[in-house]
Amino acid sequence: MSLFCGAGGLDIGAKMAQQGTAKWKTIVSVDNDYASCESLRGYIGNNTLVLQQDITTISEPHAFVKELCPKLDDVYLVYGGPPCQSFSQAGKQKGISDNRGTLLFEFFRFVEALRPTYFILENVTGLKGIDKGKLLLNIIEKVNCLDYNLDYRILNAADYGVPQLRKRLFFLGTKKGRKKATLPIPTHSMMPNLIATFPYTTVEEAFAGLPMLMLS
């Protein structure tokens, strides 16, 4: 299940993720923005139900999922990136005093109700410094109370082959009693080494082979 799916950055990543023959199947993606949902529908087609709805109006997450998918026994993974404007360094960093900041804990409301084996939460790096780090400690405490093991770290998209220096804070939770999942080690680096063996992908390399833009 995808929450705060936006135009589907994480959804597309989930669709591409594969280990052997095992693949993810996102049952439903939810966001309250019409244009974002339309964009994701255009990409994903009929493979996933893309639902335009404010998740704060979903009072019973488990009943909500069962109504959409009566044959579904369990949600294996919940992932999403709640609105980040209240945490971003480009904004006023009002944190949870901004209504958008409280949506972070709406994500954990769904995790608590659905009890997935895993969850992935993504947000801006500025979240770590909100209220002198107290918000981050609250998240860690919340995850522990929900009985999940947690791995969290700032990841740079360029370290994984993306031609963009884009840093984001990721939280990866694993239900206690299962083998703990950990965030991936870098595969690319500005200066390749024994761990990150590939050089950064440049924009020139990413654009290579595209047709020439014809201007009238």
Image (cartoon, grey):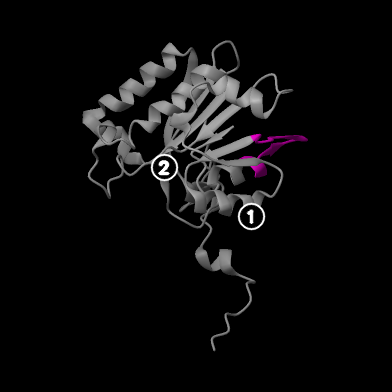
Amino acid identity at mark 1: Gly
What element does badge 2 sit on?
A: strand
**Looking at the image, which is closer to me, 210 or 37?**
37
In three-dimensional space, the C-alpha distance between marks 2 and 1, rounded to whole angstroms, equals: 26 Å
Which residue is drawn at the image coordinates 36% and 41% (left, top)? 84
Amino acid identity at mark 2: Arg
Q: Residues within 10 Å of mark 1 (few under 14, many from 20)?
A: few
Q: Would you say residue 22 sits in the magenta stretch?
A: yes
Q: Would you say residue 208 sits in the magenta stretch?
A: no
Q: Which residue is mark 1?
A: 42
On screen, residue 74 above or below 127: above
Which residue is drawn at the image coordinates 48% and 51% (left, top)? 158
Q: Which residue is mark 2?
A: 168
What is the number of the mark on residue 183?
Answer: none
**Sooner in the amino-acid sequence: mark 2 or mark 1:** 1
**Looking at the image, which is closer to me, 211 or 64?**
64
Give the magenta-colored segment's residue range: 14-27
Is 158 left or right of 84, judged from the image as shown?
Answer: right
Which residue is drawn at the image coordinates 59% and 42% (left, top)? 11
